[in-house]
Amino acid sequence: MESKQRIVFIDYIRVLACFLVMLVHASENFYGVDSSGLAGNMSMLVNEQNRFWVAFYDGALGRVSVPLFMIVSAFLLVPMSPRLTMTGFYRRRFLRILPPFVLFLLLYTFLPLAWGGMTWQQSMSDLKALPFNFPSMGGHLWFMYPLISLYLIIPVVSPWLERASARDELVFLAIFAFSTLMPWLHRFVQPELWGECFWNQYGMLWYCSGYLGYLVLAHYIRTHIKWSRHRRLAIGSACFIIGAVFTAWSFWWKGVPGQLIETPMLEWSWEFCTPNVLLATFGLFLLFTCMTSAKAPAWVDKLARMSYGMYLMHMFFLSIIASWIVGGDVANPTLPVWLAIPSIALLTFVCSAVTTWLLSLLPGSKYTVGC
């Protein structure tokens, strides 16, 4: 159930995950060939330096950002309070996330017009598509749709999780872990698996795969893992390092400098429900549970509360900061690549935090930036 008391390590995870999202998008400027600076359908690395640092920052570090957010949400919300109805849960969650989400859908549709970042025709095209998907300038908002789906399913699975034994949950998690092989099987073995075909996209593992697995994992960690701090440190470190190293290597292996490559092939093991990302996410979350602080510093608490608004707006700042630091030449940016990527992310983080804080001082800020 959602606790009114702040959980210290969860606040730290929120702040880190928010920064890692920006680190991912900062890294995309160094391999995407799209004019926006972000990774589009095609990619190319210009040199070995970019190849290594993108693999490190975006792969080894950044890929756990989205699963961490999913686990945090589930960790706080599951199981639901017995007094909370399905409609009550939906009302509470969606009143918090939907107004800011809808506002930023509109902002990413129209605001770039102010500085010539898009044409009026593109803006109108995005507006017509809004009931169905995110706008072209707000690609990071894809995350909101699976998050909403997670909220929709929580009242359905919550009663089962209340009754399920540790063994029951492990059975489901084993099926989920197996399902994370599917992106690799789709790409390298067989495009359609276990009943998938052009008239049926709901294959055998559809209902046991995806972010639902992270929801059950969050409950399992909170309810059934009673390991000592030493054991959590050891297992968490091993899982994170193995998962992170594989994720970085997978990009480095495919990213041959000077060769144009389809982005899905370059990012073949960067999907958020792959074995390596699952392993790294589990390990890092375990490491955070080892924190013993009774209370987080005020700045961590504040940033954690502002993380939603910062996530929503960060692309407005990142594109400007990245163009300044990259300077139009990804092979020779203003700063060395090893410093340029985290600098873009950090400056974006600071600008987003300051802006979210200022907006939070205005009346009705929970409907604009969620805090």
Image: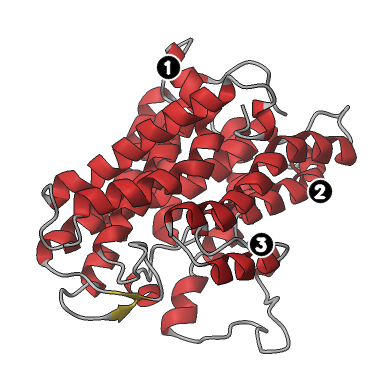
Residue at position x 28%, y 50% from top?
322
Spatial distance from mark 2 to mark 3, Cα to Cα? 14 Å
Give how far across and how far down residue 314 sits, in percent.
44, 43
Amino acid residing under circle 1: Trp
Q: Is residue 101 left or right of residue 120?
A: right
Give how far across and how far down residue 129 sits, in percent.
67, 68
Q: Is residue 30 left or right of residue 186?
A: left
Q: Is residue 216 left or right of residue 308?
A: right
Q: Which residue is mark 2?
A: 156
- Decide: few, some or many residues near mark 3? Use Cα within 10 Å; few <14, some 14-19, many ≥20: some
Answer with the quarter of the image where residue 267 lies.
bottom left
Q: Is residue 242 visible?
A: no
Q: Is residue 193 visible?
A: yes
Give how far across and how far down residue 152 sits, in percent.
76, 50
Amino acid residing under circle 2: Val
Quarter of the image with the C terminus in it = top right
Amino acid residing under circle 3: Cys
Label pair 1/3, CB-CB below 8 angstroms: no
Choose mark 1 or mark 3, whichever is in front: 1
Residue at position x 48%, y 52% from top?
114
Spatial distance from mark 1 to mark 3, Cα to Cα? 38 Å
Label pair 2/3, CB-CB below 8 angstroms: no
SS of the residue at dot 2?
A: helix
- Decide: few, some or many residues near mark 2? Use Cα within 10 Å; few <14, some 14-19, many ≥20: few
Q: Which residue is mark 1?
A: 299
Give the farthest residue toward the top.
Answer: 294
Q: Which residue is mark 3?
A: 208
Give whichever of 168, 250 is nearer the camera: 250
SS of the residue at dot 3?
A: helix
